[in-house]
Image (cartoon, rainbow, N blue to C red):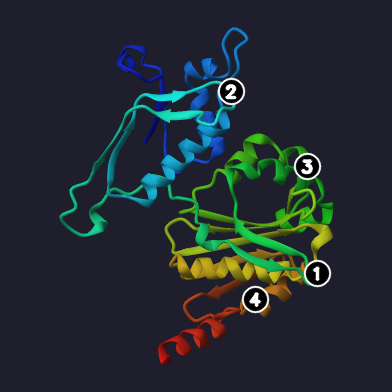
């Protein structure tokens, strides 16, 4: 747990604190601070300059990352942390701190594990569209909510229908309550990937496509879903995104990946066939499935050749 609040020798008297679970990002760190009364003082008192809240966010994020990367840490106490107003060279100063370590007498598997799975950065990969545009395929993040709003605003009714099997209103798709559930995901149960393009001139980010792999209850299977922006279809995104989802599913120990596709969605059916899915046409939907234990995915042969070359060397 990460505890934030008023410090000093009277910390037990003031009882002004809030608790969050690592890993934290800047959004979660700010929300953690906003739950305390001292947050109002940090914004400036009686016309005084505010503290460097962005630097305080970064400290909380780094602290949560530290305890995740070093599970032998049992406790860290920084009290007091001096937060100075303005934008000075040293906006934060730890006046006192201590670190307690776990007694390491056995295997590392006995060390405590985080309640929330950290951001799976190992699944980030660069890629290029057929026209040469550089993009990044990465797991979704909580701060992607405004990017998802812009993404849904760009979708046509046809794209929405092929994804949801019915026309869903824009207001429903971009509702804050719905997007929060999508962005603040449990990576252990459901993993969503986005295709992120960064404007090389202005630096703004834009989501071009979204893919999702959802575990099924009481089964070691998962369902996939894809949604490609209209302006970026026929660029190979569907194959690349689904291929990455399948590789992740195999790494996560999933046995089979399933999907239901509309009969008129020929593009998605072609992508599935290309990646080795079996298809069973029906009156209302086309059922698709693939066994990950025996599937040969794009890039498998290259990885096998590289491993064989390394072994021989």
Image quadrant for the C terminus? bottom left
Helix, strand or loop at label 3? It is loop
The answer to which quarter of the image holds residue 30 is: top right
Q: Residue furthest front?
A: 89
Q: CA distance from mark 4 to mark 2?
A: 62 Å
Helix, strand or loop at label 2? It is loop
- Which circle's residue, 3 or 2, is located before the other in the chain? 2
Q: CA distance from mark 1 to mark 4?
A: 21 Å
Q: CA distance from mark 3 to mark 4?
A: 30 Å
Which one is in front in this view, the residue at disc 3 or the one at disc 4? Answer: 3
Return the residue at label 4.
Answer: 279
Return the residue at label 1.
Answer: 234
Q: Residue furthest top?
A: 46
Q: CA distance from mark 3 to mark 2?
A: 45 Å
Instruction: Decide: few, some or many residues near mark 3? Use Cα within 10 Å; few <14, some 14-19, many ≥20.
Output: few
| Residue 222 rendering spot, x and y as whole percentages | 52, 62
Q: Which mark is residue 86?
A: 2
Whether 84 is drawn above or below 78: the answer is above
- Which circle's residue, 4 or 2, is located before the other in the chain? 2
User: Can the viewer see residue 254?
Assistant: no
| Residue 162 rendering spot, x and y as whole percentages | 76, 59
Helix, strand or loop at label 4? It is strand
- Which circle's residue, 3 or 4, is located before the other in the chain? 3
| Residue 38 rendering spot, x and y as whole percentages | 48, 17
Return the residue at label 3.
Answer: 169
User: Can the viewer see residue 52?
Assistant: yes
Whether 49 is drawn above or below 194: the answer is above
Image quadrant for the N terminus? top left
| Residue 9 rendering spot, x and y as whole percentages | 30, 16
């Amino acid at each position: 747990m990460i505890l934030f609040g008023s410090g000093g020798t009277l910390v037990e008297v003031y009882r002004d604190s809030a608790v969050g679970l690592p890993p934290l990002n800047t959004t979660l760190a700010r929300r953690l601070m906003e739950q305390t009364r001292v947050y109002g003082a940090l914004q400036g008192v009686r016309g005084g300059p505010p503290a460097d809240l962005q630097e305080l966010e970064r400290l909380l994020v780094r602290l949560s990352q530290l305890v995740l990367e070093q599970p032998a840490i049992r406790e860290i106490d920084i009290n007091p942390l001096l937060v100075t107003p303005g934008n000075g060279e040293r906006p934060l100063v730890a006046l006192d701190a201590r670190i307690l370590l776990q007694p390491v007498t056995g295997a590392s598997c006995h060390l405590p594990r985080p309640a929330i799975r950290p951001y799976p950065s190992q699944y980030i990969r660069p890629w290029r569209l057929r026209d040469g545009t550089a993009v990044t395929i990465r797991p979704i993040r909580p701060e992607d909510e405004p990017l998802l709003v812009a993404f849904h605003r760009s979708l046509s009714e046809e794209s929405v229908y092929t994804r949801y099997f019915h026309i869903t209103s824009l207001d429903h798709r971009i509702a804050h309550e719905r997007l929060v559930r999508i962005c603040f995901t449990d990576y252990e149960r459901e993993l969503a990937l986005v295709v992120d393009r960064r404007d090389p001139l202005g630096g703004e980010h834009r989501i071009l496509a979204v893919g999702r792999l959802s575990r099924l209850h009481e089964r070691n299977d998962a369902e996939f879903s894809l949604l490609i922006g209209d302006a970026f279809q026929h660029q190979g995104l569907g194959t690349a995104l689904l291929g990455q989802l399948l590789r992740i599913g195999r790494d996560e120990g999933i046995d089979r990946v399933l999907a239901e596709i509309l009969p008129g969605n020929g593009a998605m059916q072609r992508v599935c066939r290309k990646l080795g899915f079996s298809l069973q046409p029906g009156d209302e939907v086309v059922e698709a499935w693939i066994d990950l234990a025996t599937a040969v995915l794009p890039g498998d042969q290259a990885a096998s050749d590289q491993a064989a070359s390394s072994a021989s060397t």
